[in-house]
Amino acid sequence: MAEAGGTAGSRPAGPGCGVQVSVIVPVHNSECWLDECLKSVWEQDFKQTMELSVFNDACKDSSAEIIAKWKIKLEDAGVPVIIGSNNSSQPRGVGFAKNQAVIQSSGAYLCFLDSDDVMMPQRVRLQYEAAIQHPNSVFTSHGPTVIMPTWFCSREWFYHVGKFDEGGKGVPEDLLFFYKHIQKGGEVVRVNHCLLLYRYHPQAATHSVLEETIWNHRVRFLEDRVLSSWTSFTIWNAGKQGKKLYRSLSPATRKKVTAFCDVDEKKITRGFYTFEESEERPKPKIPICHFREATPPFIICVKLDLTGGAFETNLNMLNLKEGVDYHHFN
């Protein structure tokens, strides 16, 4: 990661329309947070042309009234507001709402904002400045994870990657878009400032996505991007996470696992892990060895900053190159 009902119509002309940044806000029953969210658009210190594109995905609360109120305020401040809506009785989902908000907008750059989050006043300005320097990138805020509400990218790149998955509730549309972005050669650029207040609450859409769904998508991406080109590898962690990864692999990929490695003497003394769920006879038994005796490449299933530096010291002593001799999966 470097630092630095009604639906909308067809794809607009984009940059030729003269708007530099479109703030993209999908909305579904967000009355508790929407005022603060839209106020944060109004408070941006960005001096170039900016518009707000909101898509109301079958809201049943007072979200529409809040949007209408802020449309007046924002347009008085020189920020055009485009409002689209799904007038059916059922929401179509976050992916659909984001796509529609993008389609109806016209900015050269897209600034994604969830309706329950709040932007810092400098967000659009800082990410726009970074975007000028880094084409083909998704821009995020600082922090430990790539959180979708801090994404900022060019319209051209968005359409190159392809729209969000519209499978609806339970689909991690942001993760799937991010994987497509990486597969098409996209980069991730971090703007190392606080850009967003991210709300985590029981009604958040993220809770509709099962942890197991995320896990399975991550494993398939790992197999496609890394393990498909390896003839064999070692899983670093003979505990719960390492064994879960092994069980989640496709049968063909499981055959490439030559060993587990660990530092826990109890696990190492046990000697091997038996895959009881296997239909093979005899059941596969994978050796467990000390990490110093293991053969790279490794898939590392150990969380960083969790052992007081012990794991990092062990890894460094092997003089391996990340991306070649090992990949983290934690």
Image (tube, grey):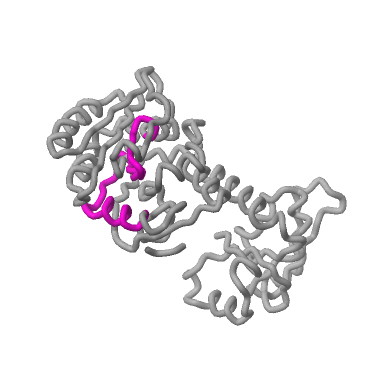
Answer yes or no: is residue 182 visible.
Answer: yes
Tell me if residue 53 comes above or below residue 273 in the rendering.
above
What range of the chain is rendered magenta? 102-131
Tell me if residue 317 comes above or below residue 135 in the rendering.
below
Near-viewer residue (5 or 311): 5
Say if the magenta span includes residue 120: yes
Q: How many discs appear? A: 0
Place of residue 113 in the rendered image (x, y in percent of width and height, measured from the top left): 32, 43
Compared across the picture, whether 76 is left or right of 226 comes to: left
For image coordinates 72% across by 64% down, the residue present is 233
Say if the magenta span includes residue 290: no
For image coordinates 46% across by 43% down, the residue present is 174
Place of residue 93 in the rendered image (x, y in percent of width and height, measured from the top left): 43, 30
Compared across the picture, whether 187 is left or right of 43 comes to: right
Compared across the picture, whether 148 is left or right of 278 comes to: left
Place of residue 258 in the rendered image (x, y in percent of width and height, measured from the top left): 77, 64
Q: Quadrant of residue 261?
A: bottom right
In this view, which residue lies farthest toward the front?
16
Near-viewer residue (14 or 93): 14
Near-viewer residue (204 or 57): 57
